[in-house]
Amino acid sequence: MNIQIAYNIKRLREQQGWTQQQLADKLQLSRSVIAKWENSHVTPDISSLMKLSDLFHVSIDYLAGNNTFHENVIAELKHVFQTSDQSFDDEAVEIMEYVMTFPEFKERLFQLKQLTPKKQHSINELLGAIIQQYKQL
């Protein structure tokens, strides 16, 4: 099995805060099937990949680890921001993956963008404080 698919299924499930059983229930499968996928013992069939894609709001290419999309976006961002820094690549990919995994966060970012710079700064400060509080828990 493609190890990347196994890794992505597990990572996306954990990002949602779901157990294997909860994911299995959503897909109307047994928990053992999910475990086999995540342990690279079995590859999901195309029907299951489509369901996973819909459930996680990602493409099947993304589940399979096809990085062409990411590479194209990174190249475009590098051009726009005129940088060749490798750390920029890693950070941009992480941010894109997060936004792709949590579409509601993308919506909030667009809402934030519509606010005045002063309000954006205030919300950024609040968000920073909230994150620091949660780190201490």
Image (cartoon, rainbow, N blue to C red):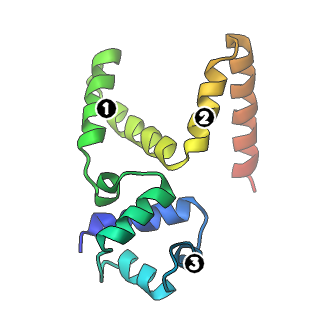
Q: Earlier in the sequence, mark 2 or mark 3?
A: 3
Give how far apart the Cα atoms at labels 2 and 1 are: 19 Å
Given residues 85 and 114, the one toward you in this image is 114
The percent coordinates of residue 52 (x first, y second) are 43, 64
Residue at the spot of label 1: 73
Position of 90 with respect to 56 (left or right) is left
**Compared with residue 6, is residue 131 higher up or lower down, i.e. above or below?**
above
Question: How busy is the neighbourhood of tag 1: few (under 14 within 10 Å), some, or many (20 plus)?
Answer: some
Residue located 50% across and 84% down the image: 31
Residue at the spot of label 3: 25
**Compared with residue 59, is residue 129 higher up or lower down, i.e. above or below?**
above
Residue located 55% across and 59% down the image: 15
Identify the secondary structure beneath mark 2.
Answer: helix
- Residue 37, picture quadrant: bottom left
The percent coordinates of residue 100 (x first, y second) are 47, 44
Given residues 90 and 61, the one toward you in this image is 61
Identify the secondary structure beneath mark 3.
Answer: helix
